[in-house]
Image (cartoon, rainbow, N blue to C red):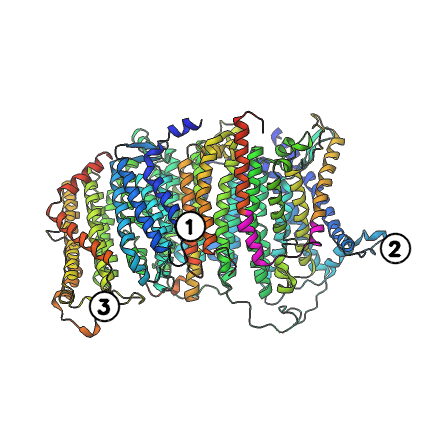
Amino acid sequence: MQGVMFIVLALVTLFSALMVITRKDPVSSILYLVLTFFCFAGFYVLLGAQFLAAVQIIVYAGAIAVLFLFVVMMLNLREPEAEEGKELIPIWKPLGYAVGIGVGIVFLSYLASSPGPAIPPLNGGDEIYAMGRADFLGKALFTDFILPFEIAGVLLLAAVLGAVALAKKKRV
Amino acid sequence: MLDLSIVMSMAFLVEKSIVTVFIFIVVLAVVAYATLGERKIAGYLQDRHGPNRAGIGKHKLWGILQPIADGTKFFMKEDIIPDKANKILFVLAPTFTFCAAGFIMAAIPFGDRITIFGREVLLQIADINLGILYILAIGSLGVYGIAMGGWASNNKYSLMGGLRTVSQMISYEIVMGLALVALMIDHGTPALRQIVIQQSGPIWHWSVFSHPLGFLLFYISVFAECSRMPFDLPEAENELVAGYHTEYSSMKFGLFQFGEYTHMTLASCFIATLYFGGWTIPWVAVPENPGLIWGIISFGVLWIKALFFLFVFMWVRWTLPRFRYDQLLYLGWKKLIPLAIFNIFLTAGLILLFQKFGIAG
Amino acid sequence: MFDNLIAGMHVGRILPEIVLVGVVLLAILTDVISPRGKSTGPVRLVSLAGLIGVLVATILKKDDFGQAFGGMVMIDGFTFFFRVVLTFITFIIIYVSEKYIGLAKIRIAEYYLMLLLALFGMMLMVMANDLLILFLGIETMSICLYTLVGMSRHKASSNEGALKYFLLGAFTTGFFVYGIALIYGSTGSTNLTDIMVYFRTVNTAMPVIAWAGVGLILIAFAFKTSLVPFHWWSPDAYEGAPTTITAFMSTAPKAAAFAAFIRVFYVGFGDLSSGLEPVLWWIAVLTMTVGNLIALRQDSVKRMLAFSSITHAGYLVVALLTWEQMGASAILFYLVVYAIMNIGAFLVAIAVNRDESDEKGYSYEDYRGLGFRKPILAFAMMIFMLSLTGIPPTAGFFGKYYIFSAAVKSGFVGLAVIGVLNSAVSVYYYLRVIIMMYLKERDEEKEAPIFWAGEMVSIMFICVVLVIVIGIKPDWLLSIAQASVSGLM
Amino acid sequence: MTPNDFLPVLITFFVVGGFAGITLIATHILGPKRYSKEKHDIYECGLDYIGDSRKPFSVKFYLVAVLFVIFDLEVVFMYPWAVNFRHLGLFGFVSMGIFLVILTVGLLYEWKKGALEWE
Amino acid sequence: MELTLNHYLILSAIIFAIGVTGVLTRRNVLIILMSVELMLNSANMTLIAFSHYLQNIDGMVFVFFTMTVAAAEVGIGLAIVVTMFRNKGTIDVGNFNLLKG
């Protein structure tokens, strides 16, 4: 059952991820991105990280992608990307594809060479899925990871200040 | 050779499919009559009759067949897609709105277990541990349908309406999340079935009595999320024609409407579950071995509670005036969010005090 | 439970950071209660006072070394050294900025707030003993820097620089997280001590995954320290940023990034790191050479300094390659010296620049005959340029001397030779400024007024003095640097 | 609680999505199709439409959206905390208190800066 | 079919490569940023897969923080995009002309 689910999700994910980077129209890209996020949430469920699956949808699909969509709507960006012009990192464009494909192949060739350990570990019962529950994660977060948690607060504060400083119309 | 576990899981799937379809049909029926109910209530409040003609032959039956007539009309209308619209997104938008509302159904406990044909069946589609979080996650997707509709129509009113709705919905989503945090502090779990069971017993076990402020905040944000009056600025007809669905007609418009009512109906169920004991009856203990009768009663109890909130939705709509846009953001960010944070601290502080003095909270 | 949890965490050891967060909150509140448009002055004062508080807290805690928060952070001499250096740099930048931000039309309190928060991120980077803390530190710093670079919203160069910096920074984050994921997968931990122990004792079951992780993290660091071929962002970001921020970015974040670099690769990946030698060798050569060659062709002093900072990062990689205490202490020494001379040079550049609202500006032409016009200013600039070139008796000379002698001692003779050759090339563009100042005639018609601010002059003066003092007597700084790294190995 | 328990959620997705899809297809088949230029044009209160909708709107919406993202994360951090609150006790209260003080200062800042005003 | 750890690792490696390719070959700032999100997501999946495999919760907690950082970063990044659009009326990297790296 899980194997089938994985294959289906993987195919959808690959398709939509490819669509994200190939669409000319940003809105289509965003919607495919949301689909990709959804599939990732599915993988997280398969991996027992159910709380993170919910957070994935709340944060990525419900906030980050909405922000993207919001910007596209607000700026009313309906023109497709220009054909001319240089890329972000000024290297020959086919080299970009080559790097991407090369990175993929290097990882693939290694990983595919050995079957790899079974996941989930075979000697576990249902309790191996308990780790991803909100209460387990919370216990770890609020004992061992208390410092990163407070730092995250400061990071978010920095983001608030930065966004206001950059986007506020009148500076007072 | 058939593996026993596969047979088991097939049985599980069949059972769940039946439950899902059953619940979906009930929800659809309620939604269909909610549309009629709304017009009846509007009529009553405005001292007129409301729709009362659609019946069988000469028997008008107070218009109870009106939803069927409406539905048929939606089906038979021309399916217009404006020339300048983005065709795919234009069609996808209402679908998405409806789906995002309907998906909420999966986590709500509509009733206790019932025993049919010797098999114990839970009247809840998925008794997942995430419960509240699942609903919040799905709820956060509601903006897409509206944003897509506003974008795809390629009409200024639609785009403006879409943007307004999105910024309204996201602002109140935070209020909703914060209100539910206080609730989760108390119950210690996001699983809805457990929250319901914790509320059984005397009526003061209902969360609404321990979280009055949280309930109020949550209810207000639900109004905003469903973009109901007094939060229906997105479709403020005197400013924006019909907002994001200006260009929509036929069943695609129908799905937007249907989505709104589904959202409202399921939100009412959610409120009843979270704050009003769900399918439990005050002072009646949850039986160890529930039979068919108990299952049906619990199912009915939840719907009675939910219908009450659905009624309040309609009542408010025809009673209160609409907010101005700036007032709406002002209310959300400067009043409700600070209040919600205060509520969380209040709840947490009280629980700490109770723990310290050994009172079971 | 409460007391047990708190006691095991050694919260006191991160007192300076706690003070810093307090200062940030206080500064924000000051901004909020100050009258509109007049908040920068009070916020600046609060920030400066707060940074003194941070320094005091750092010094108070200078004997309380050890891990805190269950090994998440490591407070040792190394941390102490960088805490002091970074706080000082931030203090100086905040101190000199008040008049400049008026000129650059960015007189808003966020300027100071972002600097303080960037300092917080950098402090995390230098004490991080867990890849998670390091990640959060880098991101906190980066978010503030993106904002600071893009702060001159009316200038297209600022917009473009910020956007480019941001996009490449985000790209780097992807590499970094993926690298961490692979390291975590092969060792089962993100804690540097655990990772070190694992690599030392256990023959990892997934060597290729571990290697890929190390490689990806190396790429991320190369981006952050702008090593060739991952340097695209830095000249644009440096040029687009307000010049005080350029001075800040080329010193403090670079120092913090190298500190983290040293800790991750010396401590965490320990034995694995030596396998990276060939890669780092080429990176060092490319960084020194490419930075130099492009700096040669610049017409703007600001851009020249930006590209030369790439070259200087290359020298630091040479020292890093030695994987020895001597190399590490040479890096610390060089970072301090570089900060002093670079901040000084940028301050002179601000003073001489013709028109801040000009998208380009900072032309070499502005320096024509400066030696006759403003002899003291020109003298200061000459000292900084000589020091950046590495000519004795300036501090820059000893910086390079320690680095190259460490390289020679570890057997990297070829690398040292290339480094010295590159220093020789850099003479061309640094001396070009001096030639402009002293050997070209004044052109009085084209001269623009000098931008003076009392704070800038005093800091410039201190920088000059320090460059000369360290240039004559470098031992004390070196011994501090050596003491700081001694606990690391 | 294994991944299999999430299968009913998937079933719901199919049932609800299927219903929506079928209704749309049905209208498409059942409804009449009479093309006319006016009808398929953009609605602007019956007048001929002016310009197109491809003009950027004001940026004032952006701050609301970005503040939403930040606060959404704050709320997400609170879920695991809330679920464990009774277990964490005073320690949890204090640590969340610090976190919220930091972010409340952020909210206060936005408020005073007018980021929440409707310009 | 039995799932192994490598299934997840391979999938995330491919998505990561897709993200890298997107950054390197596209010029629309928003799409570049989305490609970065793909990269981060694939890293998250790797972390969770390892975390599940090792039965060690650190990886999952890390993902939580990655998401926080991603959100904060996007918030700032799109603010820069908006600012730039206001100045120049375009968000295409191909139209960068002042600075040349």
- Residue in the foreground of this view, choosing between B166 and A168: A168
Visible in this render: residue B176? yes
Quarter of the figure that contains the N terminus of chain C: top left
Name the mark on residue C55: none
Was residue C218 drawn as part of the magenta stretch in this picture? no
Q: Nearer the viewer, mark 3 or mark 2?
A: 3
Neighbours of disc 1 within 10 Å: few (<14), some (14-19), many (20+): many
Quarter of the figure that contains the C terminus of chain C: top left
Label 2 belongs to which residue?
A: B57
Disc 3 to disc 2, C-alpha distance = 95 Å
Q: What stretch is highlighted in magenta?
A: B313-336
At numbered mark 3, what does the secondary structure look like: helix, strand or loop? loop
**Quarter residue D98 falls in:** top left
Q: Main secondary structure of the magenta part?
A: helix
Please state the chain letter of the residue tagged with numbered disc 3 in the rendered image. C
At numbered mark 2, what does the secondary structure look like: helix, strand or loop? loop
Residue type pointed to by label 1: Ala
Residue type pointed to by label 3: Pro
- Residue in the foreground of this view, choosing between B278 and B73: B278
Please state the chain letter of the residue tagged with numbered disc 1 in the rendered image. A
Horizontal side, residue B165 vs residue A152: left or right: right
Label 3 belongs to which residue?
A: C449
Label 1 belongs to which residue?
A: A159
Name the spot of residue C186 as percent of width and height, x first: 37, 35
Q: Which of marks 1 and 2 is in front?
A: 1
